[in-house]
Amino acid sequence: MTLTRRHTLLAGMAAATAALLPLRAVASVDEAIAEFTGGADLGSEGITLTAPEIAENGNTVPIEVAAPGATAIMLLAAGNPNPDVGTFNFGPLAASQRASTRIRLAGTQDVIAIAKMADGSFARASQEVKVTIGGCGG
Amino acid sequence: MADGVKPRVKVPKTAAAGEAITIKTLISHKMESGQRKDGDGNTIPRSIINRFVVDFNGENVIDVTLEPAISTNPYFEFEATVPESGEFTFKWFDDDGSVYEETKAVEVG
């Protein structure tokens, strides 16, 4: 095969698109985190994220987060079309800063939890969940 | 109001003062994500519960923001402190403006 100008252009475009797609997803995760933390540094102590290693069905994946002393915990799914999952805000009558729920995951990806502590610091935990059947109904 | 929405809440009937009790809630709701397409390839519009709030005697326990990535029939489990006898109120806010409410009384003995 001779390398014509057209072929080179096409190959270049394909490579550029492939490189852009994952970048865009990562950028919106970073944006969501920045919006929540205001750009503050993220620690890794004091937050526990419990998620299954393998989820058979991405439509309902049980997730538990705990961060003693947190005022709010945000959950993100890095590989979903929209990475936001939800935010727990704990009131004065919350006995513990712990909550569990069930979430949708489009495919194998990292689930991220960011806790906002009472002293204004932030902590981050993440775990990879392998998904057998994605939960986006596509 | 979306069809067939039914809240279910599990709260102990009695507790000791200041005790931490576990609360489990489930509400039947299809949580249409806005990502799915129907048979003709048209996007099915988003229709979810976007906020869930629990109060005890008017004081806040938990306030959850929900996004489309929360599963069908949103389920939550958390812990609350019960300082005195009173009533929990649970409120789910739907995208279409409806609010689903449930209350549970707890006796402190």
Image (spheres, coloured by chain):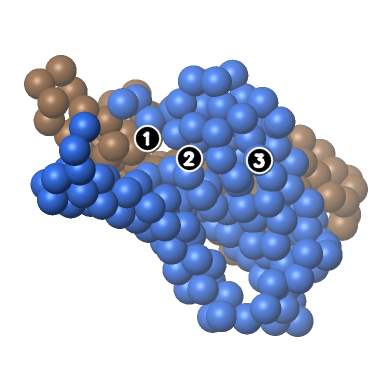
| Contact (Cβ within 8 Å) of mark 2 with mark 1 | yes
Label 3 Cα neighbours within 10 Å, binned few <14 / some 14-19 / many ≥20:
some
Q: Amino acid at mark 1?
A: Met
Image quadrant for the N terminus of chain A?
top left
Q: Which chain is brown?
A: B
Label 1 Cα neighbours within 10 Å, binned few <14 / some 14-19 / many ≥20:
many
Pick the residue in front: B28 or A58.
A58
Q: CA distance from mark 2 to mark 3?
A: 18 Å
For the point 63% across and 35% down, the residue is A129
For the point 84% across and 50% down, the residue is B20
Q: Position of residue A80 (x, y in %)?
A: 44, 43
Helix, strand or loop at label 2? It is: loop
For the point 38% across and 53% down, the residue is A19
Quadrant of res A55: top right
The color chain A is rendered in? blue
Q: Nearer the viewer, mark 3 or mark 1?
A: 3
- Residue designated by label 2: B70
- Residue designated by label 3: A128
Whichever of callouts 2 and 1 sits on the residue coming sooner in the sequence is 1
- Subunit of label 3: A
Q: Position of residue B50 (x, y in %)?
A: 40, 50
| Contact (Cβ within 8 Å) of mark 2 with mark 3 | no
- Subunit of label 2: B
Quadrant of res B38: top left
Label 2 Cα neighbours within 10 Å, binned few <14 / some 14-19 / many ≥20:
many
Pick the residue in front: B47 or B107.
B47
- Residue designated by label 1: B31
